[in-house]
Image: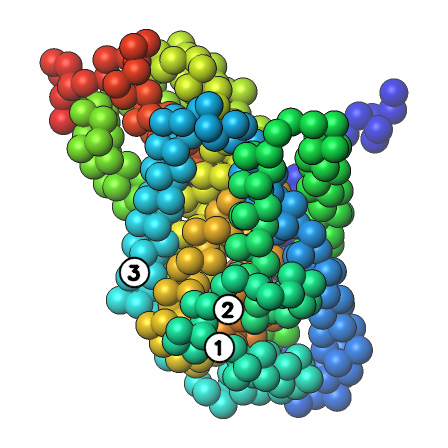
Amino acid sequence: MSASAAKPRMPLHWKIAIGFVAGLALGLLVYYSVGTEAPWVQTLTRYVTQPFSTLFLSLIFMLIVPLLFSALVVGVSEMGDIRSLGRIGWRTLAYTVLLSGIAVLLGLVMVNVFKPGAGVDPVQAQQLLSESAERAQAIVKDSAEQPKGMDMLLAIVPQNVIGAASSNASILALMFFALMFGIGIVMSRETPAIATLKRGIEGLFEVSMTLIGLVIRLAPYAVFCFMFNLAALFGWDLVFRLGAYVLVVVGALAIHLFVIYPIALKVFGNYSPVRFFRGSQEAMLMAFSTASSNATLPTALRIADSELGLPRRISRFVLTIGATANQNGTALFEGVTVLFLAQFFGVELSIGQQVMVMLVCILGGIGTAGVPSGSLPVVALICAMVGVPPEGIGLVLGVNHLLDMCRTTVNVTGDLGIAALVSKGEADAPSLADEGDLAV
């Protein structure tokens, strides 16, 4: 084998980082030297960088409906027979919804308090929107047609599933249908037809994952185009806004990981948080390194047995489902990102709209699980739902891998935490209560 053939390929996140830095640097150079009014700059942005970034977004939007539907149905159907699982299944679901809700609420509170995206010149924001006027007009129209009040609540149950799938404003209805569809599969008698249906939806999920992986390979080039366009327009202000955004996301994830989880372990499980984190550190490191819940699952299963001593029948069920359905960090990231982009573009979101964002993020934590960078399509879609330009996801693509590593660590730790909580009271449950120097 030749030396060139044996040379390992550069990881995708490094390519994205290079595209981010190169696009940002070149955009800033243009902003402070020739300006955006130069003919060659306008030609470059109009016929090269802007069309390519639009194509990247179109590919992402193309995959949203099959991705969310199949992932959510698979995530719910993998719970098995709810009637026989009984207590374990419903306790897992309850802890998942509770902790995901707390995570999103924490993120929304922090982004409202610190406002990392506020302070941008409205004229500059409008100039950016004018580069894709047709898409902006469609977003405004979708937002205006969105139901309000009681109608919004009733609209969660779709009268036409196909219509819900074709409308950004009705994505919550599509997710509700997918949730009910998954529950229906779980509660149906296992027949050859049901088994074939499950395999078909799992196949759709796998295909969606594969296509997302192919599209994400274009991310380094799309990031370069996004950052060049945005930096050339906003200058250094963009850097400061991104820095504040990263700090808010990482800060919220850290609070959820090191404050909310220990409180839940202590209050609901009477477990020592120190002992839990000491036993979970290998899985946490693997999650941070790989940025993948699925890649970390074998390690999590092993340490749940060897380090935490959790009952195998519970840990295998909870951790396997958790890799798909319990994504606290992802839900938090999605909520913070949507509100950050809303502040960046000067879009005022009402309390009702923020509650809707919170609900979609909780369900999105299920719908995007196991898919590399799968939270970005959900973020773009939620933005479209509430009238925020989805093109803004280009702002966060460059820092996405770092945030992905952090939120995956929160996700995997949450899976282990829920497995510990669900195992409480079982005959073969471990004793993780405070012990000596491990007490906190």
Residue type at mark 3?
Met
Q: Is residue 56 visible?
A: no
Residue plotted at (48% across, 77% down): 147
Q: Which residue is mark 3?
A: 110
Distance between the Cα atoms at labels 3 and 2?
29 Å
Mark number, residue 155? 2
Distance between the Cα atoms at labels 3 and 1?
27 Å
Comparing 301 with 321, the one in front is 321
Q: Quadrant of the C terminus?
A: top left
Q: Is residue 7 above or below residue 154?
A: above
Residue type at mark 1?
Pro
For disc 3, the neighbor class at 10 Å (few under 14, some 14 to 19, many from 20) is some
Q: Is residue 185 visible?
A: yes
Comparing 178 with 336, the one in front is 178
Q: Where is residue 178 drawn, in percent x and y? A: 59, 50
Q: Is residue 26 above or below residue 249?
A: below
